[in-house]
Image (spheres, rainbow, N blue to C red):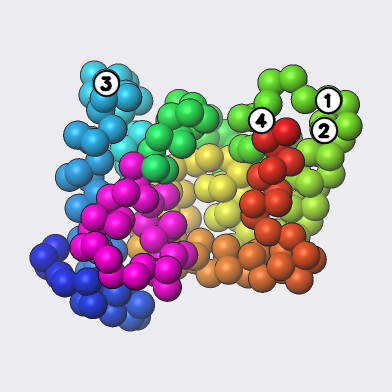
């Protein structure tokens, strides 16, 4: 364990491959599990039955977000401070969206298809008929893009994690993988989807805006 890396070492190790990256991901996970509970317990009590799941989900999503944004780190603070701020923002967002609630794992079974994307569940409660139709079209478009751009394995994992809300550790156990391998798989899948959306003239922000009207 080498948690006391300097900024340059964190960046180099997380951009590396093999054992160096595996160790950095494990250490970053440890850092987040150490700092997030105290930072977020003011909004969700530690006595809540959801608390441990909420912290773990927040830590995992934070690592994915950090991997996506490594190139945006400007070194104005300690790397772990930058990660901490991302984690707190993600945690607060999850609480606002009630994503910390327990989810059914039934949808992870092979061949199942969800009826909605997560953004639909947390959208404005009273959308207009036009808004509902636009959301439906966006959901269908995103699901089609996922089918076309992702490998079958990437598609299965992304449907489980991003669409059905299944915890990363559960998915890893079900498919005989591990958390760090899924970080890389999801990161690569996100890049594929982002590039396709950009070719279509869309961005993730554009899609989310549909659900905030």
**Residue behind mark 4:** 123
Sequence-wise, which precedes: disc 4 or disc 3?
A: 3
- Asked which quadrant contains residue 156, the reply is bottom right
Marks 2 and 3 close (CB-CB < 8 Å) = no
Q: Earlier in the sequence, mark 4 or mark 1?
A: 4
As drawn, is 115 to the left or to the right of 80? right
Q: CA distance from mark 4 to mark 1?
A: 12 Å
Q: Is residue 190 left or right of residue 14?
A: right
Q: What residue span does the magenta drawing correspond to?
A: 60-88
Residue receiving disc 3: 45
Q: Is residue 19 visible?
A: no
- Up-down relation of residue 156 to residue 184 (above or below): above
Q: Are dots 2 and 1 in contact, CB under 8 Å?
A: yes
In the rendered image, residue 182, in percent from the top left (x then y), is placed at: 44, 61
Under circle 4, the secondary element is loop
In which image quadrant can residue 176 be found? bottom left
User: Residue 131: which disc?
Assistant: 2
Contact flag, marks 2 and 4 (Cβ < 8 Å):
no
Q: Which of 109/95 is in front?
A: 95
Identified at 76% across, 71% down, the residue is 199
Marks 3/1: CA–CA distance: 36 Å
In reply to whether residue 61 is colored magenta, the answer given is yes
């Amino acid at each position: 364990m080498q948690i006391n890396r300097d900024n340059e070492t964190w960046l180099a190790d997380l951009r590396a491959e093999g054992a160096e990256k595996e160790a950095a991901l494990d250490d970053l996970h440890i850092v987040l599990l150490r700092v997030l509970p105290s930072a977020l317990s003011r909004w969700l009590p530690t006595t809540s039955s959801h608390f441990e799941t909420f912290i773990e989900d927040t830590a995992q999503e934070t690592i994915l977000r950090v991997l996506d944004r490594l190139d945006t780190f400007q070194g104005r603070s300690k790397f772990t401070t930058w990660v901490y701020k991302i984690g707190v923002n993600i945690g607060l967002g999850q609480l606002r969206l009630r994503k910390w609630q327990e989810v059914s794992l039934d949808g992870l079974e092979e061949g199942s298809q969800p009826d909605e994307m997560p953004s639909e569940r947390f959208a404005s409660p009273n959308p207009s008929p036009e808004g509902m139709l636009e959301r439906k079209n966006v959901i269908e478009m995103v699901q089609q893009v996922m089918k076309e751009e992702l490998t079958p394995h990437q598609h299965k994992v992304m449907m489980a994690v991003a669409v059905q809300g299944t915890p990363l550790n559960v998915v890893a156990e079900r498919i005989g993988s591990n958390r760090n391998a899924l970080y890389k798989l999801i990161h690569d899948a996100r890049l594929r989807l982002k590039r396709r959306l950009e070719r279509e003239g869309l961005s993730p922000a554009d899609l989310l805006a549909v659900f905030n009207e």
